[in-house]
Image: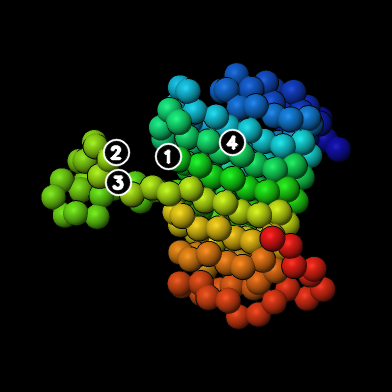
Amino acid sequence: MTLFAALRALWFRTVVPARVAAAGVKTSGSVRFYGMPLISQVSGSFIEIGAGCVLCSDARYTALGVNHPVILRTLSSSAVIRIGANTGISGASICAVVSVSIGADCLIGANAIIADTDFHPLEAESRRSNSDPARVRSSPIHIGDNVFLGAGAVVLKGVTIGNDSVIGAGSVVRDDVPPASIALGNPAIVVGSVPGSEIKS
């Protein structure tokens, strides 16, 4: 290992966790960071990362690379983002107005988007300049344990993805996905079952 690589690894182990904590994120046990995630947290909101999680924000440390660092962003004072133990996230964007819950042992592929809000109103009038959150539709997202989101997958507001499910790369999930299901496409539809999975609710 070169001196530069050793210093970078030390920075990942010491400086990055301290900066994440200073940003108001709660970590339960040891969390590994490869690069600094982008964190934006509204006062009063809550972000928690479970023990054993790995957040990769540096393209050198994941096979496909990432287009940007992991983004964890709350957009209201009551918003909650919870990430379960031993989950791995590569360059994903996770945004919550209400709640985004990700279970344990999940794989969140490069550049996935998980957002519980439309960000802007559907009505044409003042869509770009709207500042009234009551006009923007938001609904909680729940992703179960051991879920695999392929690279570039998009999970939209109000969706529940059951335990053990797999979402194909580039898919847009707008409806619930049952446990142990394989879903893909835009919009994502269930095309099969996960081999060897014991279905859990």
Gap in angstroms between the C-alphas marked 3 and 4: 26 Å
Q: Where does label 4 land, which residue?
A: 37
Q: Where does label 3 land, which residue?
A: 136
Tell which circle, 2 or 4, labels the residue nearer the N-terminal end.
Answer: 4
User: What is the crowding at mark 3: few (fewer than 14 residues within 10 Å), some, or many (at least 20)?
Assistant: some
Q: Is residue 60 above or below residue 3?
A: below
Q: Is residue 152 visible?
A: no
- The answer to the question of whether label 1 and label 3 lie on touching residues, with beta carbons closer than 8 A, is yes
Gap in angstroms between the C-alphas marked 2 and 4: 26 Å
Gap in angstroms between the C-alphas marked 2 and 1: 9 Å
Give the residue type at disc 1. Answer: Val
SS at mark 3?
loop
Give residue 131's position: percent from left, percent from top: 24, 36
Gap in angstroms between the C-alphas marked 1 and 4: 19 Å
Give the residue type at disc 3. Answer: Val
Tell which circle, 1 or 4, labels the residue nearer the N-terminal end.
Answer: 4
Residue found at the very far bottom of the displayed protein: 191
Q: Where does label 2 land, which residue?
A: 133
SS at mark 1?
loop
Q: Quadrant of the N terminus?
A: top right
- The answer to the question of whether label 3 and label 2 lie on touching residues, with beta carbons closer than 8 A, is yes
| Observer-nearest of 199 and 62 | 199
Q: In which image quadrant can residue 34 be found?
A: top right
Residue found at the very far right of the displayed protein: 1
- Residue pictured at 53% horizontal, 64% vertical: 176
| Observer-nearest of 77 and 54 | 77
Q: Quadrant of the C terminus?
A: bottom right
Give residue 71's position: percent from left, percent from top: 53, 40
